[in-house]
Amino acid sequence: MMKELRPAVISFLLLTLLTGFAYPALVTGISQVLMSDKANGSLIVKGDKPVGSALIGQNFSDPKYFWGRLSATGPMPYNASASSGSNLGPTNPALFDAVKGRVQALRDADPGNQQAVPVDLVTASGSGLDPHISPAAAEYQLARVAHVRNINPEALHKLVAEYTEGRQFGILGEARVNVLELNLALDAVH
């Protein structure tokens, strides 16, 4: 019996050392050397203090800020430990009611804005954590933010353009604006 047990125990210990310690240490070391910023959460630092991550949205509700995509996480918005979508399909009446309420909230915040509301301002992303909005969603909010902050809309438009990221590698995804980075730049300017 010991003859069969000994190789099994040795194999178990060796594989545990290899896959549980050596491989993770190697991958962590390589990532720290080659892409330290990404390996450490893509933190956005203001002064010496981290204020967020470029990968996780934040809840902005003050009219002087650009608002991000809605979060579907609970019990609080943008809770990275509870990443999930809303699971409401396009024919679900609850989704229709939620979108209707979100459109009304946007209209109430900017009563003079008669533009069509971009879909990313009234729906959550698949993860519920998306830090980006479309350039159209930023443009939709531009007049409100310019008015509340008493900023020239053209100057604000240039700031939005400066913080608009193109498609990855020129072909993947869509153009997007990181809301946290834009709002931090907005606070720095005004």
Image (tube, grey):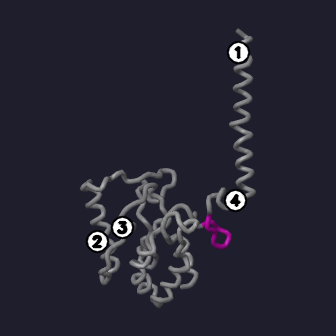
Identify the disc placed on residue 35: 4
Pick the front one: 121 or 134:
134
Question: Distance of mark 2 from mark 4, alpha carbons?
Answer: 43 Å
**Residue 96 % position (x, y):** 26, 60
Question: Distance of mark 1 from mark 2, alpha carbons?
Answer: 68 Å
Q: Which residues are magenta?
A: 43-50
The residue labelled by disc 1 is 5
The residue labelled by disc 3 is 119
Furthest residue toward top: 1
Most common SS among magenta residues: strand
Mark 1 vs mark 3: which is more N-terminal?
Answer: 1
- In the rendered image, the quadrant that contains the C terminus is bottom right
- Pair 2/3: label in front: 3
117 lies left or right of 132: left
Mark 1 vs mark 4: which is more N-terminal?
Answer: 1
160 lies left or right of 101: right
**Residue 163 % position (x, y):** 54, 76
Indicate the secondary structure of the residue bearing disc 1.
helix
Furthest residue toward left: 93
Question: Distance of mark 3 from mark 4, alpha carbons?
Answer: 34 Å
Tag 1 and tag 2, C-beta contact below 8 Å: no
Q: Image point 52% across, 80% down: which residue?
A: 161
- The local crowd at label 4, few if under 14, some if 14 to 19, many if 20 or more residues have their Cα within 10 Å, is few
Q: Amino acid at mark 1?
A: Leu
174 lies left or right of 94: right
